[in-house]
Amino acid sequence: MIYVLKIYFLGGIWHMKFGHFDDQTREYVIETPKTPYPWINYLGSEAFFGLISNTAGGYCFYKDARLRRITRYRYNNVPIDMGGRYFYINDNGTVWNPGWSPVKTELDAYECRHGMGYTIITGKKNDLKAQVTFFVPNGYDGEVQQVVLTNEGSSAKTFKLFSFAEWCLWDAQDDCTNFQRNFSTGRVEVDGSVIYHKTEYRDRRNHYAFYSVNDAIDGYDTDRDSFIGLYNGFNNPEAVLAGKATDSFADGWSPIASHYKEITLAAGESKTLIFVLGYVEMPVDQKFEADGKTINKVKAKAMIEKFDTPEKVAAGLADLKASWDKLLGILNVTTPDDKVDRMVNIWNQYQCMVTFNLSRSASYFESGIGRGMGFRDSNQDILGFVHQIPDRAKERIIDIASTQFPDGGCYHQYQPLTKKGNADIGGDFSDDPLWLILSVSAYIKETGDWSILDEMVPYDNDMSVAQTMLEHLKVSFYHIVNNLGPHGLPLAMRADWNDCINLSCYSDTPGESFQTYTNPKFKAEGGYSKVAESVMVATLFTYTGPNYVAILKHLGKDDEAAAAQAEIDKMKKNIMESAWDGDWFLRAYDANGEKMGSKECEEGQIFIEPQGFAIMSDVGKEQGADKKTLAAIDERLNTEFGLVLNNPAFTKYYIQYGEISTYPGGYKENAGIFTHNNAWIICAEAYAGRGEKAFEYYSKIAPAFTEETSDIHKTEPYVYGQMIGGKDAQNFGQGKNSWLTGTAAWNMVAISQYILGVKPEFDGLRVDPSIPAAWDGFTATRQFRGDTYEITIKNPDHVNKGVKSLTVDGKAVDGCIVPVSGDGQTHKVEVVLG
Ligand code: BGC
Ligand code: NOJ
């Protein structure tokens, strides 16, 4: 097979990329199945979801990746990424898959197009072309798979097609642990060309799944061992090799669904088959037909009929694309750099929507059974997608705030199905409440809808103790003020944003969770040290606090505003008195009252987290703290692949710090390049007017820029990962934990609001870019509070920052905030920098 690999000579080394961006169709086109890691996409954005790799690996689930897992997937498998929705072709003894895997027969041509909510995989072998389009239509609880087979040869061809899906027995955790039971529960039904997965349906479940095809079949298999063979694998299923299904019927063991069909195509002829992998819920009294046994298939049949012709599929796909046009039409930019454009206009916004849908639950690094929704994570995600779906953002904010406690503390996680706080993980993460202030402010700034502050929101999901959202903000703000340590800095509690700095843990027992374990040593003090303090929470407080003050002022509550401002001022003073290390801000005081993140430390002398927020809230600005800090970051944390989290990396276990020092240097929180908080420095550089540095840091981590070094970066060049190996790591520059990370939202903020400088504020749309001086300018279209703003930025003097003049529809405006006109019209905004 001829793989078109692009080879580059960069920085003295040869590099490779494995595909290209098609900005017109908003697709990433993968040109080889052998990517350096599986490169995935997400299908679905409402209730039915699928993860799909470039070789059709992955799985689907309904709403909850743990409790309603529909197809099975084995994480950390050997070889990697085994299990998915597979089509096998047996063409006179040559067996292959359109997506190359799992048979891995070399193809004559291969291509995978990951688009917005759909994936198209095309393979070609011996003049037979197979193109499979996978998507979850809007408002539909199923995955549609359209297979188009074309005989590109000059004579007729007869071959055999097999579909394949392996059912998961619903609870993904139980499915991979409780074999003594599971090997005897699997049940199926076959009706014409539809295979039903009805495991446990007879008993307590009101849901089943099905796999259908819109044509007559010549056979089927529903029992895995009959189809694959006990000693074979996905790469050589016995039935496929034999060229015939066995019509097996699963009874216990592992139920699967495979259709078999013999197909003849004349030279040049095409055939289209439409498969649907669907999920159905039935009211309890309608679960069965009159015999009380056969499952009621009315809903499944209606679903199948919805997409049983190519025309219907085309319409469903067009509808999906139209909804993305709308979502991505709200913010659009044209800059001198097409990599920036494709991040801002397409992929970064797309990833923000995926983090809205999935939070941190299911990716190729998150197993779907580990975590619920994070209080801090989901609040930060809001920043990235609030402009796209403000109503759903509001609903989400209310859900999150409902898991707060009356004193402002919060459950660290909540469950998506119940929306209740997760008691197993508990609370006492010191940063959590502050992110609520930020998300509510972002919502109001975007929409101008102040009524969110009047919403009655429960505490701990108990409506009888509900208070207004404004009150929730107040308890959030004062949760910090009421929990200060010896230096007047916020107590670090269980952990702050960095889950791996566990200053009250002191764990020396293997297997103890750093996140949930509380050392008995601190029991008497309420669970955590009353000495350990977080400088990061202090600066996050001075950064978010002014939003709360502005809200109070808007409401005419001047006394409360003044009181809150006094707390912010006091905190700034305390920071400069006790947390300024001379050239940067300290990270923390540990439970012994020792400095963490200081020149005085042997390792971990400087940390990234507190710095950006300090700069953006002008802490110590009059003493030049901002410039000194930014210089120190550049000197100590900057690398060719981004900014490391801390330096020097920890080389031994520090019991007083916790998990951070358990990672080998250069990985994760121990001096990895955490792209999430790179964004805070990008924002700070832009805020400080240093457009060059801001852009340098941005372009080191933005996926489109990492594309040309895909061989090193390894993960998808179209989305951010949580982490890139840092300079202390052997795998320096290698991306990990792609897709589900707060990095998506924060880098969206960094590029669109700080570098390009189009930033919603309470009283209008700020336009105040901080760009590379070489840029002549750029244009942006922004829908905002019902109006459309066509913004042109001109940079004749080639500066980084500074608005010399701003006009709206030809009229000069003072400052750089475009006032809200609210007339539903299009307005022309012209900004000249200088
Ligand atoms: C990881 C963190 C994560 C935490 C909680 C730690 O092991 O390093 O990134 O936030 O677990 O799941
Ligand atoms: C990932 C977690 O989802 C997030 O909440 C945390 O802030 C970072 N890791 C840093 O530890």
Image: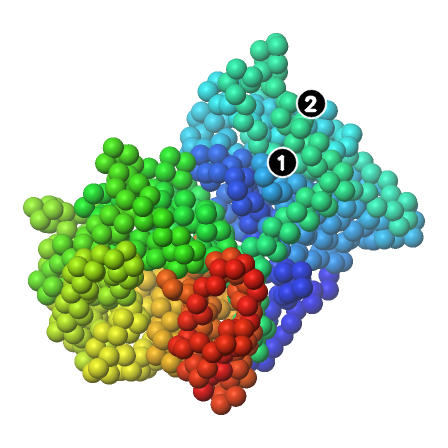
Quadrant where the image shows the N terminus: bottom right
Q: Does the image show residue 495?
A: no
Colour scheme: rainbow
Three-letter amino acid code at the position of disc 1 = Leu
From this view, report whether residue 799 is shown above or below residue 234.
Answer: below
Residue 235 lies left or right of residue 673; in this view the side is right
From this view, report whether residue 157 is shown above or below residue 742.
Answer: above
Quadrant where the image shows the C terminus: bottom left
Q: Assign a secondary structure to mark 2.
A: strand
Label 2: which residue?
Answer: 191
Give the residue displayed 50% in from the left and 30% down from the top. Answer: 169
Judged from this view, the residue extending furthest toward the top is 291
Residue 490 lies left or right of residue 629; in this view the side is left
Label 1: which residue?
Answer: 277
Name the residue nearer the viewer: 34 or 361: 361
Give the residue displayed 18% in from the left and 57% down from the top. Answer: 560
Quarter occupied by residue 421: top left
Looking at the picture, how far across and down is residue 54, in whole percent?
Answer: 61, 54
Looking at the picture, how far across and down is residue 209, in whole percent?
Answer: 58, 30
Three-letter amino acid code at the position of disc 2 = Asp
Give the residue displayed 50% in from the left and 43% down from the top. Answer: 74
